Image (spheres, helix red, strand yellow):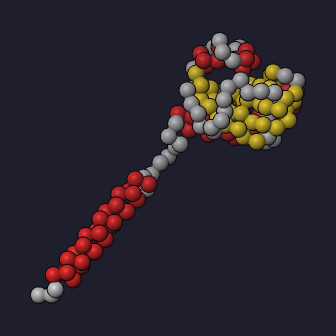
């Protein structure tokens, strides 16, 4: 049998290495899961980006995407006034906000100001049908995150 100190040091080292391996495996298992969305209800709106991009003729910079109930647009946002005739049977819309220079006459289904620095494209969800492109100077709601939902 070897010296007690050498044996204790070896056991301590092996225990520390084993604990480090268990910790590393736990951390990797938490990070390695398969995900198919952003973890928010607005993830479904990313399928509307091609429709929104065509509506503004591929100009501008994407500011964010929101999935909202049309009932939330009725009393609170000027945006609903631009789409009220079309949303009677629609329950949810994806709103895609862009920054740039936009002209109501130059975007598809243009509404709002004659020109502005912001455009919000409203697309039916589900269905991916363009409702309106609203030209504004200031966004009527926050689009700070590209995936904020209802």
**Is residue 16 visible to the viewer in this orientation of the structure?**
yes
Is the residue 89 above or below the residue 1 in the image?
A: above
Who's the residue at 62% across and 31% down the image?
66
In the rendered image, residue 2, in percent from the top left (x then y), is placed at 15, 87
Q: Which quarter of the picture shows residue 133?
A: top right
Q: How many marks?
A: 0
Is the residue 22 above or below the residue 120 in the image?
A: below
Please state if 56 lies on the left or on the right of 65 as rendered.
Answer: right
Q: In front here: 41 or 89? A: 41
Q: Where the C terminus falls, by quadrant?
A: top right
Please state if 82 lies on the left or on the right of 44 as rendered.
Answer: right
In the rendered image, residue 63, in percent from the top left (x then y), is placed at 71, 38
Q: In front here: 105 or 101? A: 101
In the rendered image, residue 142, in percent from the top left (x then y), is placed at 66, 29
In the rendered image, residue 123, in percent from the top left (x then y), is placed at 67, 29
Who's the residue at 77% across and 31% down the image?
119
């Amino acid at each position: 049998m070897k010296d007690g100190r050498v044996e204790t040091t070896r056991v301590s080292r092996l225990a520390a290495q084993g604990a480090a391996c268990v910790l590393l495996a736990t951390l990797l298992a938490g990070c390695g899961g398969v995900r198919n969305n952003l973890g928010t209800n607005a993830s479904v709106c990313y399928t509307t980006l091609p429709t929104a991009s065509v509506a503004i003729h591929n100009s501008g910079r994407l500011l964010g995407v929101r999935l909202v109930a049309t009932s939330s647009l009725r009393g609170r946002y000027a945006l609903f006034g631009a789409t009220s005739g079309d949303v009677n049977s629609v329950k949810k819309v994806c709103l895609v906000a862009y920054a740039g220079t936009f002209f109501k006459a130059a975007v598809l289904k243009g509404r709002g100001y004659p020109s502005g620095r912001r455009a919000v494209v409203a697309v039916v969800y589900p269905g991916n049908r363009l409702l309106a492109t609203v030209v504004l100077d200031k966004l009527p709601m926050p689009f700070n995150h590209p995936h904020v939902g209802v």
